[in-house]
Amino acid sequence: MHLIHRGILNKSYKENNLKSFKASFKKGYGIETDIHATKDNKFICFHDFTLKKIFKINKSIKNLNYKDLNNISKNNKVEIPLLKDLLISSKTKHYLFIEIKPLFSKILLEKLLKETNKFKKCVFISFKEKNIYDLLKIKKVTNVGLSFPSNISVKTIIKKSKNKNVNCLILDKYFINNKKIQEIKKNKYFYTIKSKKEFFKYSKKNNLIFENL
């Protein structure tokens, strides 16, 4: 299974917005997206921790209520969708790999599980493994994956992969040709494939998270 990284991105579509997500679904692909929580505990699809890069505003997502954030996005004509709107758009037909960017409190994780309860194709992933282990403490049967950067050791990945409650591994493409990694008996998703050459080279035997090609 292949996933589009943050939705289709080109002149007509921008990353992490409903229009690009829906276009991805029409092509038959699931998506990988990032989420943050606002000050009033609304889950949004957004990559960065602050508004500095996109809006040139030096404010953190966690310190803004959704109403204020929504006003900023409308004034700048850059949509920041709520996770619940993405869930509805998926119609439970397409996989959503939801990357939890910050470290969430137990209260937020419980809210996240409740909000996504009816959507069975959600997989929660995070580079902050505490998010994943805390989710499993709240609800043991939850679709989760551990994410790993390129600078982590193969030995560490193998060790952490032995947790039977972890469903999959999200791995930098640096590891795609590593024999020991490929021998791990879990679903593995390699990110981020950025060229058609890479996609056609690896797509037959691997699950890929790829950008619009």
Image (tube, helix red, strand yellow):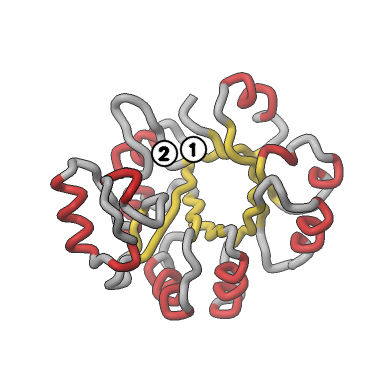
* x then y, percent, for residue 105: 46, 77
Q: What residue lies at 71% left-to-right and 38% top-to-bottom? A: 174
* x then y, percent, for residue 179: 85, 40
Residue assigned mark 1: 4
Q: What residue lies at 60% left-to-right and 71% top-to-bottom? A: 130
User: Is disc 2 in contact with disc 1, using a CB cutoff of under 8 Å?
Assistant: yes
Label 1 is placed on what type of residue? Ile
Does residue 63 lie above or below 146 as drawn? Answer: below
Q: In which quarter of the view is residue 173 placed?
A: top right
Q: Quadrant of the N terminus?
A: top right
Residue 121 in view, yes or no:
no
Task: Please name whichever residue, 145 or 60, is drawn nearer the observer in this view of the structure.
Answer: 60
Label 2 is placed on what type of residue? Gly
Task: Please name whichever residue, 87 or 134, is drawn nearer the observer in this view of the structure.
Answer: 134
Horizontally, is 198 left or right of 108 in the view? Answer: right
Mark 1 crowd level (few <14, some 14–19, many ≥20, 10 Å Cα): many
Horizontally, is 152 left or right of 142 in the view? Answer: right
Residue assigned mark 2: 7
